[in-house]
Amino acid sequence: MSEHDISRSEVPEKRVLNIGFMALTDAASVIVAATQGFAEKHGLTLNLQRQASWATLRDKLLSGELDAAHSLYGMIYGVQLGLGGAPATDMAILMGLNHNGQSINLSPALQAAGVCSGDALASRAHQGGAKLTFAQTFPTGTHAMWLYYWLASQGIHPLADVDSVVVPPPQMLAHLKAQRIDGFCVGEPWSAQAVDEQMGCTLATSQSIWPDHPEKVLGCTRSFVEQHPNSARALVMAVLEASRFIDENEENKRSTAQLLSGSDYVDAPLSAIQPRFLGQYQDGLGHAWLDPHPLRFHADGRVNMPYLSDGIWFMTQFRRWGLLRDDPDYLALARQVQQLELYRQAAAALDIQVPDEMRSSRLLDGKTWDGSDPAGYARSFALNALAESAVAALEESH
């Protein structure tokens, strides 16, 4: 479909959109859509604006300075619920941008001390003395939730046994080098670059926690969708086509990795971006593997569907860790945020299959998540923060 093929009723109300992104490998489909002709095909011009932190990106979305953005799944739901330092605002998830591709790394000091496994880390965390400090990227973000989930699966209470701080993704290595943190959870290429520079090891990938987990999304305020439905649909179509292009073959992945390495985008060495972009991992401990659940951007549409169950999962974790004092109406909120009808329209126009609204997944601790009983699921974990004392501690920490 060229711009001339767009019917008059579908012409974007707003043709020039400001799109925010962070310097992360998983911003690829948004960057490709803006720079490789996919946006123009659907009557749009996308002005990419790299942001310094997730908090800055969020604030610019809320002020209208950004129309839409490469966003943390949990950040969008945090704003919807009035968590994480911003007023409650109706938000929208237009589509998923990627699955997998985040990592938990430990510092060189811990690696040198032989702390290179979950068991060893649990022993260190429980031995007393100064608490270890782990960095994640946003209080309600995906990295906080992967870090908390993984630590808890190892018997480490993330709110009691260790300290947690927020650090923007591109600053992780500087904090590691300055010995301000003992480890971090972040998106690529920062975990890979730490390993490449012999700045510690990768202890776990996010896909080892939840194979094919939801990660970044294309997010905006609901008012943007309501005021500019055609623009929103065209944006989804552009990013969907870019996503399909990236995943189509290895040549496209390699060219995309090269594009991302540029100073306007991720601004990192290609050697830190390309291997894990292709699913090729080394952990700094002598292990190398081709990951069965690599960073994915499309997978015949399975990545891009804004599943209700994915949105609900993040809310169960907010409840588990005390960010929510009560159970919300999980399903109703997910139906408000996930823009399913708009996504279906965009996917149908591109002949992309639309999966079911709910999906089932088995996580590393053996628990199965299918969205059917979110309140029960949030309470089902041995380690949680549903007690009022733990809630108070969490509030003080943020």
Image: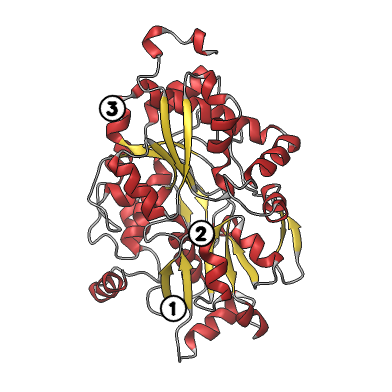
Of the residues under marks 1 and 3, which one precedes in the sequence?
1
Q: Is residue 140 left or right of residue 301?
A: left
Quarter of the figure with residue 14: top left
Q: Is residue 168 left or right of residue 87?
A: right
Of the residues under marks 2 and 3, which one precedes in the sequence?
2
- The location of residue 312, given as percent across then percent down, is 37, 47
Q: Secondary structure at mark 3?
A: helix
Q: Is residue 239 left or right of residue 82?
A: right
**Residue highlighted by disc 1:** 162
Of the residues under marks 2 and 1, which one precedes in the sequence?
1
**Numbered circles on residues, count:** 3
State which mark lies toward you, 2 or 1: 2
**Residue highlighted by disc 2:** 169
- The location of residue 244, given as percent across then percent down, is 61, 30
* Label disc, if present, on residue 102 of the rendered structure: none
Q: Say whether residue 119 is visible.
A: yes
Quarter of the figure with residue 115: bottom right
Q: Residue at x 66, y 35 (%)?
A: 247
**Residue highlighted by disc 3:** 226
Q: Residue at x 28, y 25 (%)?
A: 227
